[in-house]
Image (spheres, rainbow, N blue to C red):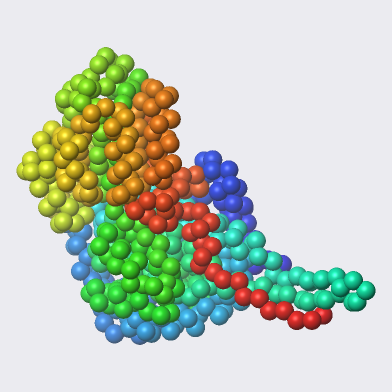
Amino acid sequence: MSHPLLEKHRATLDGALSAIASRGYWSAYPEMPSPKLYGETAPEDGKKAYEAHLGQRFELGQPGQKDWHGGEKSPYGVELGVQYPVCDIEALIAAGEAAMGGWQRIGADGRAGVCLEILQRLNQQSFELAHAVMMTTGQGWMMAFQAGAPHAQDRGLEAVAYAYREQAFVPAETVWEKPQGKNPPLVLKKHFEVVGRGIGVVVGCGTFPTWNTYPGLFAALATGNAVIVKPHSNAILPAAITVRTIRAVLAENGLDANLVTLAVANDRATTQKLVTHAKVKSIDFTGGNVFGQWLIDNCRQAQVYAELAGVNNIVVDSTDSYKRMLGNLAFTLALYSGQMCTTSQALFVPAGGIETDQGHKSYDEFCADLAQAVSGFLAKPEVAHAVLGAVQSADTLKRIVEADSGSLGKVVLASSKLENPEFPQAEVRTPVLLACDAADEAAYMEERFGPISFIVKVADTAAAIALSERIVSTHGALTAGLYSTSEAVIEAMTEATWRSKVALSINLTGGVFVNQSAAFSDYHGTGGNPAANASYADSAFVANRFRVVQRRYHV
């Protein structure tokens, strides 16, 4: 009989398994923050739960605690004042390793069941998590709720489904019988045990501390491994809430809570000591190229799953819906102030202009029209604040100032600072658009994280496609886009993305945007270009996190 928690959540798991096979729309957790869906008191209860953390010590009861550390600075200017336990790295690793025995013994069914119970509990805490994500990352409320809670939970569930499916391919036992002609057959009984590779470390990012953390966390956990979550120094609270919930569910089910712990590191050396430890066998990382490459180069004892920087781009050839195309692009460039790993940075536009349903548009006209579309979209303060959120880091603010100076290209649309009446200290900036020539590669051919985009003048559409392919192949990208009414152009761009291995969105003019990625349907990253060496999620994302150990004997 399978584990009781697996039976409790069987419908959810079956739905996820069906979804990853069909790739159609499916979601286990409601994305709208509605009291009708989450309970009449859920919004207020969640806010109170978040506020109860402020100015307090976040107790976790972990081994090896030696200090307290905080220092998160909200992009909204809100004082957080939460202190988190700092624990000895060796103690966390030893405790995690000791906890893996019991975790292995409950089998793949048991692990999946417990993970599903954890995800359901996290879903019940969605409002609390959303406030924590919003106030540490600068996301607007709706994005913080959706991406920080149900969408992140969907990504975690997706990883559990892949992990369950891959482990289910391994039979528990078999009888092996080899005929020997006139002699009695050789008969062996064989048992196959799925065993986790070892400690998994998940290094969180500052902009999406749950969405980018849950895939690796649940992939490692569901395949039999202990997990240490090392959050970004400015987005600890969402990770701490997650870890405390996981530890509670583990303890309630008679399992060692130290299977999952939080590693708060107040210096780079501590993080490096953690990720290079001989017992650490997998590392999940989202962030900049410098530290990401350091992990790949130095953590030879572990499998590193890294999502790094890239130059996402869009080729604009022609359109039969010019106004809606501009509207779609305006939303894409403004959403969360461009602080998404999937936001488009470079738009390639032919020097001779483009054909549209509103007639021919020159390169300069396109630049002006896109600038007007962005400005018009953000004209209402309530819309602007909901979409833009706040700028997460001082480094991003510096990049905006540099772009605004005109040193990287002609300023088509300058960034402006907006005052948020609800959060007077919030750092809110509108996007900056720059025009440049294809030859100005130093300007646009590196990631400039934030609301900074380049409208790059290229010789023609063929040159744009070639440039897009070269950028993806050499610098990486998670997303590419195309606007064209020509089937030949669409085919050429499609083949270019096959060669450079990047996801392509074609003629998006409605309520779907190139920087959005849907769990169970969209593969987030291909693992085939420099922007990421793995995908959320596919079989490769989970299968190398466990090993099969067999034993055999004569019958």
Name the spot of residue 131 as percent of width and height, x first.
31, 55
State whether residue 280 appears in this view.
Answer: yes
Could you tell me how many numbered marks the image carries? 0
Residue sticking out furthest to the top: 359
In the image, taking residue 501 as reference, residue 3 lies left or right, namely right
> 429 above or below 392?
above
Instruction: Kindly give the residue lying farthest to the right in the view shown.
Output: 182
Q: From this viewpoint, which residue is outermost toward the front?
A: 181
Quadrant in which residue 243 is drawn? bottom left
**Front residue (pair 97, 72):** 97
Q: Position of residue 91 (x, y in %)?
A: 38, 84
Q: Residue at x 60, y 67 (%)?
A: 108
State left or right for residue 129 relative to residue 459. right
Residue 430 lies in what quarter of the image?
A: top left
Q: Quadrant of the N terminus?
A: bottom right
The C terminus lies in quadrant: bottom right
Question: Along the horizontal axis of the image, is 8 left or right of 291?
Answer: right
Report whether residue 343 is seen. no
Question: Which residue is at a point 30% across and 18% down the rendered structure image?
Answer: 356
Residue 475 place in picture, x, y as percent: 29, 50
Whether residue 134 is situated above or below residue 444 in the rendered picture = below
> What residue appears at the point 93 percent right and 74 percent down from the top-left corner?
182
Residue at (20% x, 69% y) in the render: 71
State the residue in front, 1 or 189.
189
In depth, the one of 112 and 442 nearer the eye is: 442
**Which x, y percent locates residue 363?**
19, 25
